[in-house]
Image: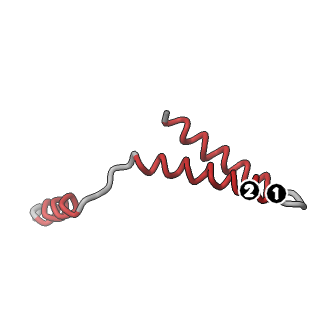
Amino acid sequence: MKYLNYLFIVLGAVVAIYAKTGTEQNEYVLTGGIVLLMVGIYRISRSIPSRTDEDTFDNNQNENNDF
């Protein structure tokens, strides 16, 4: 499933670049490529855990106690 996200990103970028290179730009293809790119990025970012203030506070406290 992780590879599907990367496939969305690569495919979206290729489609967006392809749509942008022509002399007569197809706006629908460009929009579709950007949508695929954003969907892939969103799906990957969902799996990254967020840092909470407690984690940051604990890490700073541990660093200060090393003296």
User: Which type of secondary structure does the marked residue at label 1 adopt?
Assistant: loop
Left-right relation of 63 to 38: left
Instruction: Identify the residue position indicated by label 2 in the image.
Output: 30
Name the residue at 41% across, 49% down: 46
Name the residue at 60% across, 39% down: 7
- CA–CA distance in space, label 1 to label 2: 6 Å
Name the residue at 61% across, 51% down: 37
Q: Amino acid at mark 1?
A: Asn
Estimate how packed mark 2 is, as few (under 14), some (14 to 19) or many (20 or more) residues with alpha carbons within 10 Å: many
Please tell me the numbered disc located at residue 57: none
Q: Are marks 1 and 2 in contact (CB under 8 Å)?
A: yes
Name the residue at 76% across, 55% down: 28
Q: Which residue is at the far top?
A: 1
Residue 58, position as x, y percentages in the image = 15, 60
Instruction: Identify the residue position indicated by label 1 in the image.
Output: 26
Q: Is residue 1 above or below residue 21?
A: above
